[in-house]
Image (spheres, rainbow, N blue to C red):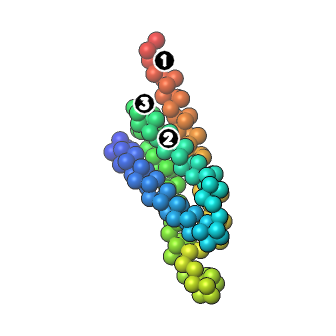
C-alpha cells in the first residue's frame, strides 16, 4: 500500500507542478501587465519552479529510488503544489476586494504578492530536500558496490 501511494503521489506531483506554475505565471502576467513592468523582473519568481523541475528530471533520469519511493517527500511535494494552486485560484476568483468593485480588476494582486514569498520558500525547500535525497541515493549506491 505504501509503494502504491508513493507512486501515486510521485506521478501527481508532476501534474500539480505544471498546474501551479501555470497559475503563478498567470498571476505574474496579470500583475505585471497592470503595472507595465517587464517580465524579466519576474525571473526570481520562476527560478524555484525551474530548479524544482530540473531536480525532478535529474531524479527521474538517474532513476533515484530514494526520491521516487519516499512517501513523505512525494506527499509533501503534492501538498506544497496544492497550496500553491489554492493561492493562485483564490487570487483569481476572490470577489471580496475593493479593486474588484471599484476598478473591475478580476485578480487580487495583494493576496498574491503577500503569499508569493511563502510559495518561493516552499519550492526552495522541495528543491533542497530532493537534492539531499539524490545525494543519499548516490552514497548508498557507492556503498552497495563496495
- Marks 3 and 2 sit apart, C-alpha to C-alpha, by 12 Å
Question: Could you tell me which secondary element the residue under label 2 belongs to?
Answer: helix
Q: Is residue 128 left or right of residue 142?
A: right
Q: Residue at x 50, y 39 (%)?
A: 55
- Front residue (pair 82, 109): 109
Name which of mark 2 and mark 1 comes first in the sequence: 2
Residue 45: x and y, percent?
A: 61, 54
Identify which residue is drawn at 44% across, 58% down.
19
CA distance separating discs 2 and 1: 26 Å
Q: In the image shown, does 102 or 78 lie closer to the viewer? A: 102
Decide if residue 5 is in sight here. no
Q: Earlier in the sequence, mark 3 or mark 2?
A: 2
Q: Earlier in the sequence, mark 1 or mark 3?
A: 3
User: Gap between marks 1 and 3, in whole Å?
Assistant: 17 Å
Q: Which dot marks residue 54?
A: 2
**Residue 28 horizontal/vertical position (percent):** 58, 63
Mark 1 in CB contact with mark 3 (< 8 angstroms): no
Q: Which residue is mark 3?
A: 62
Q: Is residue 86 visible?
A: yes
Amino acid at each position: 500500500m505504501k509503494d502504491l501511494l508513493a507512486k501515486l503521489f510521485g506521478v501527481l506531483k508532476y501534474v500539480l507542478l505544471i498546474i501551479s506554475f501555470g497559475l503563478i505565471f498567470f498571476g505574474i502576467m496579470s500583475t505585471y501587465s497592470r503595472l507595465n513592468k517587464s517580465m524579466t523582473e519576474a525571473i526570481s519568481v520562476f527560478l524555484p519552479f525551474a530548479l524544482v523541475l530540473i531536480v525532478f528530471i535529474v531524479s527521474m533520469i538517474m532513476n533515484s529510488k530514494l526520491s521516487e519511493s519516499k512517501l513523505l517527500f512525494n506527499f509533501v511535494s503534492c501538498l506544497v503544489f496544492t497550496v500553491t494552486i489554492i493561492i493562485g485560484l483564490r487570487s483569481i476568483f476572490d470577489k471580496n476586494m475593493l479593486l474588484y468593485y471599484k476598478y473591475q480588476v478580476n485578480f487580487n494582486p495583494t493576496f498574491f504578492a503577500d503569499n508569493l514569498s511563502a510559495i518561493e520558500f516552499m519550492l526552495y525547500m522541495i528543491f533542497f530536500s530532493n537534492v539531499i535525497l539524490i545525494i543519499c541515493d548516490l552514497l548508498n549506491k557507492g556503498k552497495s558496490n563496495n
